[in-house]
Image (cartoon, helix red, strand yellow):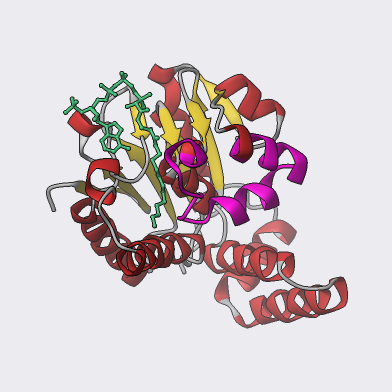
């Protein structure tokens, strides 16, 4: 893959959007490679956490490729929108947590890619925004839906209607990102969090992600039923036996196997 790099450090897979000269804009070629990388990670149950970032220190992803998009017909735009959304949804529903390490511009499709991740850590130079209405379109890779679920609806509407970008500190203040760190500490911070996640029981982490995501889309009674099922299923795992044995036997250094 030329436009996306995939590497693995222990149980952490790192996906880097690698089109620095165009600020990592999502052309079809980039989306194709991203899909391949996500398919690879999805099939790799030895990956317990994923970090997604952009190449260079200026941009995470500056959006969908405007030059490529500008002449699309309605049908082609629908196909393109559905394709990006399919990949982003696959990221959102991956078996393990996904951390976006946002190293600069996260605009349009870039903001949307970061929002398909479970956790966002931003460098101090990160800029978030949904500039689409300034281009005569709406957000098309999930922005109208995920932004309003992540931050108060009024704030999401303000960002989308005004097309104004926000800096990392504002993104932190509205809850769009989990943390803001100096650019040079970004990957180390993301990997530290990823490795911390990997130390916990992978099936329990995966079940927790599934329960949170499913519960956010349903009423509380159904959500509690989802939790009861996912919680009780853990009692069929070796990790549950091992984790609780470690506690009662006061074992501090645990190593989950699954
Ligand atoms: N698409 C294509 N090329 C891009 C993009 C982009 N989104 N962003 C940057 N580039 C290219 C530039 O054209 C330039 O190329 P070249 O060197 O060949 O001229 C290179 O990257 C560097 O960019 P700049 O010279 O503009 O760098 P600056 O530092 O001056 O500016 C900005 C950086 C502010 C990020 C500026 O590049 C910019 O505004 N980019 C566009 C941001 C944007 O509007 N993003 C939203 C795009 S729309 C979208 O994402 C919709 C998603 C859903 C689509 C669904 C369709 C159905």
Residue 120, percent from left and from top: 54, 39
Give, as a single range, the part of the protein colored magenta. 132-160
Which quarter of the figure has residue 180? top right
- Location of residue 158 in the rendering, given as x and y in whole percent from the top left corner: 68, 35
210 sits left or right of 134 in the view? right
Name the main secondary structure of what is drawn in magenta: helix
| Residue drawn where x is 39% and y is 61% of the image | 81
For the residue pair 5 and 81, the one nearer the viewer reads as 81
| Residue at x 55%, y 33% (from the top left corner) | 163
Please state which of residues 114 and 39 is positioned toward the viewer in this rendering: 114
Q: Is residue 98 magenta?
A: no
- Pick the front one: 183 or 190: 183
Q: Residue at x 74, y 60 (%)?
A: 248
Q: Is residue 109 left or right of residue 157?
A: left
Examine the image and state in which quarter residue 78 appears: bottom left
Task: Establish if 130 lies above or below 169.
Answer: below
């Amino acid at each position: 893959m030329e436009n996306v790099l995939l590497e693995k450090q222990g149980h952490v897979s790192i996906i880097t959007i690698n089109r620095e000269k165009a600020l990592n804009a999502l052309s079809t070629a980039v989306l194709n490679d991203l899909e391949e990388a996500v398919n690879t990670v999805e099939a790799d149950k030895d990956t317990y956490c994923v970090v997604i970032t952009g190449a260079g220190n200026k941009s995470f992803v500056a959006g969908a490729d405007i030059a490529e998009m500008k002449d699309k017909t309605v049908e082609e735009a629908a196909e393109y929108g559905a394709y990006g959304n399919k990949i982003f949804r696959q990221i959102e529903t991956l078996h393990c947590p996904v951390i976006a390490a946002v190293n600069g511009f996260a605009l349009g499709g870039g903001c949307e890619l970061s929002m398909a991740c479970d956790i966002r850590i931003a460098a101090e130079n990160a800029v978030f925004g949904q500039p689409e209405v300034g281009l005569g379109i709406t957000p098309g890779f999930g922005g109208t839906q995920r932004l309003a679920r992540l931050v108060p609806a009024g704030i999401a509407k303000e960002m989308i209607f005004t097309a104004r970008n926000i800096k990392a500190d504002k993104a932190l203040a509205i809850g769009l990102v989990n943390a803001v760190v100096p650019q040079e500490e970004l990957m180390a911070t993301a990997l530290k969090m990823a490795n911390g996640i990997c130390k916990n029981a992978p099936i329990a982490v995966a079940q927790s992600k599934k329960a949170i995501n499913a519960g956010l889309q349903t009423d509380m009674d159904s959500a509690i039923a989802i939790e009861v099922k996912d919680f009780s299923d853990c009692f069929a795992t070796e990790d549950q036996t091992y984790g609780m044995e470690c506690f009662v036997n006061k074992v501090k250094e645990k190593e989950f196997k699954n």
